Image (spheres, helix red, strand yellow):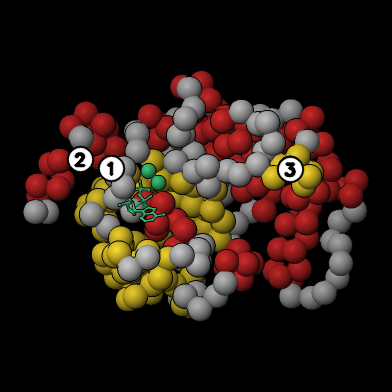
């Protein structure tokens, strides 16, 4: 489904990704774990076509087709979703309005025609409420501005809510656990598990194994360091990294 091949990326002339290889399939949950500054966020931004990151070599394929030439918007319309490490507050943009606009724009792209609205505001509100329950956010959030005044945990749940509503093929969540207390980490992990589906792929980028323990399922763990995927294993690799750190992997690959 998503395949990253020998991906090299520079930012402001500095090479950060140095030959990333990664393959994911439908229904799979992947974790990318690695030290700070190793390039995890760079990979996430590159997947979503952030203009500051330049691909100098390699390819990104979605369902066998290169998406390198596509804009962020076009990639989103192909079913890619990025949950940010630091979601931004957008004053003046209602959360519910934002979700409905995004939903309708994606629906149009996926159905390939130009109808303005696919479901009524009322139908959409019902759809949102069902999804709010899944991620454990209260209804009052829908009438607030996007992320404005949300706590850390609420922002992360709001990202998972977007994922639930938009039903992307591939979701990349960049440190959905950063800055959260342990209860919030568990809640976010449960919300991720609830919206994971048999046709969608989830990639959780994290520094710590604790969020992974709360996921219902975890198929692959990738160790990311020095701008590359250095090692891939099953869920037990996350535990080993937590108890032993990353150095042993770096030494193996030195
Ligand atoms: P991670 O998410 O794994 O912590 P990042 O992808 O954020 O790592 O960063 C990878 C490398 O790119 C680091 O060495 C970092 O210092 C560098 N980097 C990140 N952002 C910038 C920036 N705005 N300008 C220059 N270098 C950056
Ligand atoms: Mg970091
Ligand atoms: Mg990061």
Q: How crowded is mark 2: few (under 14 residues within 10 Å), some or many (20 or more)?
A: some
Label 2's element? loop
Left or right: 108, with 64 as reference point:
right
Label 3's element? strand
Please tell me which residue is depicted at 9% across the width and 47% down the height of the picture: 251
Q: Residues within 10 Å of mark 3 (few under 14, many from 20)?
A: few
Q: Which of marks 1 and 2 is nearer the N terminus?
A: 1
Please tell me which residue is depicted at 46% across the width and 65% down the height of the picture: 52
Which mark's residue is nearer the viewer, 1 or 3? 3
**Of 45 and 1, the residue lying toward us:** 45
Residue 201 lies, with reference to residue 105, above or below; the image says above
Residue 30 lies, with reference to residue 19, above or below; the image says above
Which mark's residue is nearer the viewer, 3 or 2? 3
Q: Earlier in the sequence, mark 3 or mark 2?
A: 3
Q: Marks 1/3: CA distance?
A: 33 Å
Do callouts 1 and 2 mark residues in contact (Cβ within 8 Å)? yes
Instruction: Tell me if residue 80 can be seen.
Output: yes
Label 1's element? loop
Task: Name the residue that disc number 3 marks.
Answer: 91
Please tell me which residue is depicted at 49% across the width and 39% down the height of the picture: 176
**Of 88 and 203, the residue lying toward us:** 88
Residue 178, given in percent of the width and then of the height, sits at: 45, 34
Q: Earlier in the sequence, mark 1 or mark 3?
A: 1
Ligand 1 within 8 angstroms of badge 1 C-beta: yes
- Residue 246's disc is 2
Which residue extends farthest front? Answer: 12
Residue 105, given in percent of the width and then of the height, sits at: 75, 64
Residue 145, given in percent of the width and then of the height, sits at: 76, 39
Q: Marks 3/2: CA distance?
A: 40 Å
Task: Name the residue that disc number 1 marks.
Answer: 35
């Amino acid at each position: 489904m998503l395949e990253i091949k020998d991906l090299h990326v520079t930012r402001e002339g500095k090479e950060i990704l140095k030959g990333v290889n990664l393959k994911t399939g439908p229904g799979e949950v992947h974790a990318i774990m690695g030290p700070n500054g190793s390039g995890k966020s760079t990979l996430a931004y590159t997947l979503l076509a952030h203009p500051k990151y330049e691909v100098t070599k390699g390819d990104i394929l979605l369902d066998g087709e290169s998406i390198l030439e596509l804009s962020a918007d076009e990639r989103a319309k192909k079913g890619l979703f990025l949950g940010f490490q630091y979601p931004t507050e957008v004053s003046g943009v209602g959360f519910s309005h934002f979700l409905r606009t995004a939903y309708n724009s994606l629906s149009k792209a996926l159905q390939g025609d130009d109808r303005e609205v696919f479901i009524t505001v009322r139908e959409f509100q019902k759809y949102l409420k069902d999804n709010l329950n899944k991620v454990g956010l209260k209804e009052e959030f829908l009438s607030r501005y996007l992320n404005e005044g949300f706590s850390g945990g609420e922002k992360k749940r709001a990202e998972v809510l977007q994922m639930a509503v938009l039903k992307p093929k591939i979701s990349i969540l960049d440190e959905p656990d950063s800055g959260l207390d342990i209860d919030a980490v568990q809640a976010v992990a449960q919300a991720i598990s609830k919206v994971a589906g048999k046709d969608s792929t989830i990639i959780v980028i994290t520094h710590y194994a604790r969020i992974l323990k709360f996921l219902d399922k975890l198929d692959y763990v990738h160790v990311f360091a020095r701008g590359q995927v250095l090692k891939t294993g099953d869920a037990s690799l996350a535990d080993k990294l937590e108890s032993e750190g990353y150095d042993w992997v770096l030494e193996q690959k030195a």
